[in-house]
Image (cartoon, rainbow, N blue to C red):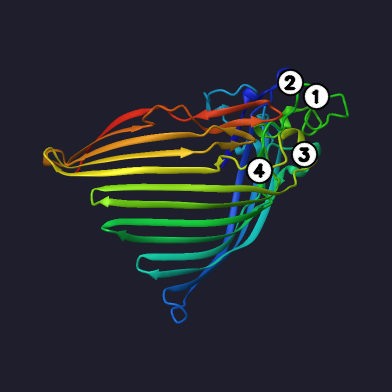
Amino acid sequence: GPQGSSVAFAQIPGMPLSGPAYNFIEEETTAVFGHFTYDMDDWLEGLVFEVGARYTDDKTESCTGTGVNTTPGPVLARSDVVEQGDCLDASSNLVNTSVNSASSDEFTWSVGFNWQITDDLFSYLVSRHGYRAGGVNGPTFSGRLNPYQSFAPETVTDVEWGLRSEWAIGGVDVRANLSAFIGRYDDVQSALTGVQTGAFCNPSSQDNPPGVSPDGDCNPSNDPAGGTLLVNVGKAEVSGVDLDFQVALTPNLLISLAGNYLDTKTRSYDLPAIFAPYVASQEINFDLTSEKSYTAGIRYVLNSVPFAEDVIFNMDYYWTDEISFSGAALSDYSLTNLRIDINSVMGRSIDFSLFSRNLFDEKYVVSGSSSGDFLGITAVVYGPPRMVGAELRYRF
């Protein structure tokens, strides 16, 4: 399908405005896979061996170009729409058009053991190898950016152990789950931002180094779309632990707790030297990833109240550590949500609910929008403020 982007706020004063970047992409995936399980009860009761394998072949073809209109606005007429034909036929609506392609293939697999130890206790150990296909950057590059028109696939091999359990203590039912994992990534795909022509670029000079001009020609119309370039930056390792518990103190009262811890490491950083001006450190960014997060919840049911069949109270709390984005750190935050459901009001087929999301009206950042050492700015997206609402449902 078609993609288009224009990042007007990141234009550099004194430089000509670049037009919107267009990318018309066609992708084709072909795969064959198989899965096999083997019951090992003769060796150990409840033990099952599993193995799966898949061969995947991915092809991407993209026609890229830059729009001649440097002032993006609402599309008012059909004639204003830029279509794939404009790119393929090199019409006057686009400049610097070309068709680029990338292909990648990988043999991926999963192998492991599942062990149903008892009816209430299950464990597994699995290793997997997966991959993310390569692709094409846009628009059409020139000069020293030519080798980075496409990027290679990313692969990962991991090992995970898990435990799932249900048990009771003195009439209190408990569910406890645990997972621990480690994954090693090769050819990590990462987005560099701010990869665009600087204010001091001299078109008549033969020496415009990276940081002044990504490709050396001082032409913003063939800079990476939105100043963002996907490249392979090296090797990484991610390990972590997931925990969650549910405790039914009574048939009407349920408490849940869950937590996550992630440890991210750069095994090697292989970013080409020409991109050094656009990064702040020699470490791989794990965008939108926090080291720690946890949740807590409480659910209480009132049965057979005078005005309804039951009333259900739900409150949950979420906290996340600071989140990384393109080298910047977005602050930690917490949220509390509340919901009350009143079912079968006055014995009728009517349900009524009240809810509040972000109950305490926290101001928090959920994502980065654009950031970069070269741009000198960090733009962020805030989460929604407190919302209070009601729902009415009629069942028939």
Image disc number at residue 318: none
Question: Disc 2 to disc 4, how far (Cα)?
Answer: 27 Å
Q: Where is residue 8 in the image (x, y as percent from the top left)?
A: 63, 24
Tell me the residue at 79%/38% (across/down): 274
- Give the amino acid at mark 3: Leu
Q: Do the residues labelled 2 and 1 touch (CB within 8 Å)?
A: yes
Q: Where is residue 250 in the image (x, y as percent from the top left)?
A: 24, 51
- Give the amino acid at mark 4: Ser
Question: Disc 3 to disc 4, how far (Cα)?
Answer: 16 Å
Q: Mark 2 points at which residue?
A: 15
Q: Of residues 369 and 2, which is closer to you in this image?
A: 369
Question: Disc 1 to disc 4, how far (Cα)?
Answer: 26 Å
Image side of residue 37 versus residue 286, left or right? left
Q: Mark 3 points at which residue?
A: 145
Front label number (2 vs 4): 4
Tell me the residue at 73%/20% (across/down): 15
The disc, 3 or 4, on the residue closer to the chain's N-terminal end is 3
Q: Name the residue under label 1.
A: 201
The disc, 2 or 1, on the residue closer to the chain's N-terminal end is 2
The disc, 1 or 4, on the residue closer to the chain's N-terminal end is 4
Front label number (1 vs 4): 4
Category of crowding for the residue at label 1, using alpha-carbon neighbours closer than 10 angstroms: few (below 14), some (14–19), many (at least 20): some
Question: Disc 2 to disc 3, how far (Cα)?
Answer: 20 Å
Q: Position of residue 363 (x, y in %)?
A: 46, 27
Q: Of residues 350 and 91, which is closer to you in this image?
A: 350
| Residue 82 is at least partly visible in this image | no
- Give the amino acid at mark 2: Met
Category of crowding for the residue at label 3, using alpha-carbon neighbours closer than 10 angstroms: few (below 14), some (14–19), many (at least 20): some
Image disc number at residue 190: 4
Image side of residue 288 versus residue 285, left or right? left
